[in-house]
C-alpha cells in the first residue's frame, strides 16, 4: 500500500535556511536511542527550556535543515518532506493499534511524502493468513531495510479462546527477529522531570538483547510419565550422537533449545560497534558457571572477536569490554550510576530491559530497535505490550491515559534510520524535531499521561491527561515550534 504523494523537489524554505547558514545536516548513527541531542539553530524547537537541557549526549549535529511542509503555517503553505525510499509498517493490536493510527494521522501523513509498505499484524489477520503475513512483513523489511512496528498480541490459551484462533501462533516478534537476525537494543527515553525509581542512575543503560533462538525458538513439552529423555544430534554425514538428559520416575516437563555460532558472532559485532559509536563500555553477561558449554560458547565467541577485531579501537577510545556473570552484573547495575551497555542472551535481555525501563521511570519510556550487524536492516518498535486493560476501557467509551511516547519514537527512529541510509537530512531533522517536541510537552508544558504523573507522585485526576489530550498538546507544541522557527 503506497501512501506517497507527488511534490516538487524544490523547497521554498531552502533560501531562508541557506541565508542563515543552516541548510545542511550532519546525521548521526541510527543506533542513537537517547531522547534528545543538544543541537543549535533551527532544530532547537524545544521552547524556552532548550533541547540542551535533556538527554545524555552532546551534539553530533551543528544545526539541522528542515525543508518546508505542506501544512498551513499562518498564511504560508509548505511542501511535505520527501522520504526517498519506502518504510515497512507493521500494524498491531488493541490500544496500541488505536494510538498508532492517531500518531500517523497527526504526525506522519500531514508532513511526509512517504511510500509505506503496510502489513496488518493484528491477531485476526495473522490467524486468517496462518501467520504468513508476519513472514511477508519480515521479508519486506529485508528488502527495504527499514520497518516500524506497532505492539502485537502473542496468544496464550485465553487469547486463542477469546479470538477463536486456529492455533496458538508464535510471537510475531520472535518470528521477525529470527528472519532478520541482529540484536535488539533498548534504551530509556530520559525526561528530567520524570523521577527515576533507581535514583542513582545518572547515565544511560543500554540493553543489547540477542534476538535469536534460545527459549523463543525452543521445543518444550509435558512429560506424561516415567521414561528417558535424550538429546540426539545427527551429523549431516555421520552417526547419531545421544546425550542422556534425565530418567523420569513420574511425569514432568522438558525443554530443548539452540543457538548458532553465526548468530552469536553477529550479536557480538553489533554490540561492539554500538559501544564504539556510543563510547560506552560493554559488558557481556551469562551464567557460564552453570551452562558451561551453552553460555560458555557466548563468552568464548565474544572474547575471540573482541581480541581479534575491536580491542585496539576500544583502547583508543578509553572504553573496555568485560564478561561478567549475570547475577553479579545485575547487582552491579542497580548500584551503578549507569553509563554502559549490557549484551545479554535472549531471555535475560527480555527481562532486564523491562527492569531498566521501569527504573528510569516508566515502561512507556523505552526505545527498542532491532539492528543487524551491518547496521543497515533496522526495525523499531515500542518495547511495551498492547495495553489490553486500557483497550477494554476504550471499547466501553471510557477515557484512557495510555503513554504514546514509545510508539512515537518507534516512528521517529525508523525515520532517522531511513534518512541516514538515504542521505536525506531533512527526514532526520523532522524526526529529531518531533522527538524534541515530545520531550518538551512533558518537561516544559507539564502534559503527561497517568503513568508519568504517578511516577511524579501525583495521583489526582487533574495531574494527568488522556492519550488524545496528550497528543493534542504535542501537536500544538510541534506546530507552534515549527511556525516560530520557519516563519520568523
Image (cartoon, rainbow, N blue to C red):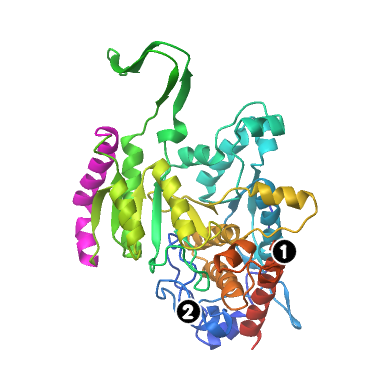
Left or right, 307 with reference to 21: left
Provide residue 336's location: percent of width, then percent of height. Answer: 32, 62
Say which residue appears at 66% left-offset and 62% top-offset: 108
Which residue in the protein does label 2 denote? Answer: 53
Quick one: label 1, few (<14), some, or many (20+) residues within 10 Å? some
Image marks 2 and 1: residues in contact by CB distance under 8 Å: no
In the structure shown, which secondary structural element does the residue marked by tag 2 occupy? helix
* Quadrant of the rendered image containing residue 155: top right
Say which residue appears at 44% left-offset and 63% top-offset: 32
**Magenta span contains residue 128:** no
Left or right, 132 with reference to 275: right
In the structure shown, which secondary structural element does the residue marked by tag 1 occupy? helix
Q: How far apart are marks 2 and 1 (CA)?
A: 27 Å
* SS majority, magenta: helix
Mark sitting on residue 144: none
Report the front residue among 102 and 483: 102
Provide residue 153's location: percent of width, then percent of height. Answer: 61, 41
Left or right, 459 with reference to 35: right
Tell me which segment is drawn in magenta: 291-317
User: Which residue of the protein is positioned furthest toward the right in this rendering?
Assistant: 397
Q: Is residue 23 visible?
A: yes
Whether 243 is drawn above or below 410: the answer is above
Whether 129 is drawn above or below 282: the answer is above
Report the front residue among 463 and 216: 463
Which residue in the protein does label 1 denote? Answer: 468
Quick one: label 2, few (<14), some, or many (20+) residues within 10 Å? some
Provide residue 407's location: percent of width, then percent of height. Answer: 59, 57
Report the front residue among 481 and 441: 441
**Magenta span contains residue 315:** yes
Amino acid at each position: 500500500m503506497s501512501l506517497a504523494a507527488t511534490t516538487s523537489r524544490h523547497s521554498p524554505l531552502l533560501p531562508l535556511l541557506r541565508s542563515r547558514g543552516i541548510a545542511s545536516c550532519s546525521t548521526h548513527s541510527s543506533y542513537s536511542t537517547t531522547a534528545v541531542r543538544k543541537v543549535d539553530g533551527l532544530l532547537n524547537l524545544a521552547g524556552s527550556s532548550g533541547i540542551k537541557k535533556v538527554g545524555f549526549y552532546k551534539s553530533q549535529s551543528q544545526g539541522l535543515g528542515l525543508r518546508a511542509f505542506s501544512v498551513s503555517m499562518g498564511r504560508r503553505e509548505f511542501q511535505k518532506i520527501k522520504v526517498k525510499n519506502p518504510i515497512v509498517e507493521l500494524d498491531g493490536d488493541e490500544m496500541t493499534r488505536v494510538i498508532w493510527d492517531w500518531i500517523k494521522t497527526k504526525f506522519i501523513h500531514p508532513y511526509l511524502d512517504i511510500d509505506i509498505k503496510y502489513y496488518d499484524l493484528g491477531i485476526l489477520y495473522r490467524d486468517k493468513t496462518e501467520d504468513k503475513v508476519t513472514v511477508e512483513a519480515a521479508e519486506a523489511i529485508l528488502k527495504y531495510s527499514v520497518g516500524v512496528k506497532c505492539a502485537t498480541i502473542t496468544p496464550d490459551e485465553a487469547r486463542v479462546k477469546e479470538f477463536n484462533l486456529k492455533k496458538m501462533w508464535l510471537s510475531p516478534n520472535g518470528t521477525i527477529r529470527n528472519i532478520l537476525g541482529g540484536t535488539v537494543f533498548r534504551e530509556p527515553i530520559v525526561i528530567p522531570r520524570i523521577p527515576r525509581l533507581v535514583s542513582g542512575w545518572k547515565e544511560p543503560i543500554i540493553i543489547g538483547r540477542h534476538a535469536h533462538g534460545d527459549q523463543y525458538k525452543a521445543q518444550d513439552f509435558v512429560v506424561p510419565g516415567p521414561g528417558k529423555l535424550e538429546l540426539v544430534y545427527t551429523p549431516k554425514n555421520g552417526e547419531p550422537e545421544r546425550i542422556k538428559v534425565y530418567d523420569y520416575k513420574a511425569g514432568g516437563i522438558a525443554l530443548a533449545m539452540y543457538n548458532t555460532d553465526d548468530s552469536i558472532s553477529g550479536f557480538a559485532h553489533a554490540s561492539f560497534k554500538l559501544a564504539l559509536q556510543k563510547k560506552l563500555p560493554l559488558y557481556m553477561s551469562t551464567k557460564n558457571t552453570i551452562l558451561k558449554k551453552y553460555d560458555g560458547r557466548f563468552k568464548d565467541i565474544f572474547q575471540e572477536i573482541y581480541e581479534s577485531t575491536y580491542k585496539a579501537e576500544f583502547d583508543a577510545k578509553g572504553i573496555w569490554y568485560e564478561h561478567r556473570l549475570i547475577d553479579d552484573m545485575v547487582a552491579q547495575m542497580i548500584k551503578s550510576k549507569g553509563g554502559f551497555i549490557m549484551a545479554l542472551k535472549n531471555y535475560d535481555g527480555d527481562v532486564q530491559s523491562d527492569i531498566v525501563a521501569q527504573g528510569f521511570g516508566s515502561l512507556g519510556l523505552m526505545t527498542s530497535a532491532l539492528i543487524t550487524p551491518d547496521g543497515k536492516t533496522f526495525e523499531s518498535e515500542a518495547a511495551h505490550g498492547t495495553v489490553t486493560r486500557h483497550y477494554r476501557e476504550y471499547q466501553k467509551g471510557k477515557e484512557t491515559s495510555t503513554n504514546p511516547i514509545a510508539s512515537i519514537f518507534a516512528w521517529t527512529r525508523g525515520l532517522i534510520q531511513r534518512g541516514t541510509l538515504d542521505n536525506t537530512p531533512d527526514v532526520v531533522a523532522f524526526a529529531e524535531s518531533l522527538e524534541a517536541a515530545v520531550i518538551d510537552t512533558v518537561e516544559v508544558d507539564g502534559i503527561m499521561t497517568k503513568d508519568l504523573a504517578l511516577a511524579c507522585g501525583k495521583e489526582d485526576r487533574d495531574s494527568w491527561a488522556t492519550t488524545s489530550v496528550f497528543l493534542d498538546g504535542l501537536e500544538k507544541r510541534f506546530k507552534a515550534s515549527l511556525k516560530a522557527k520557519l516563519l520568523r
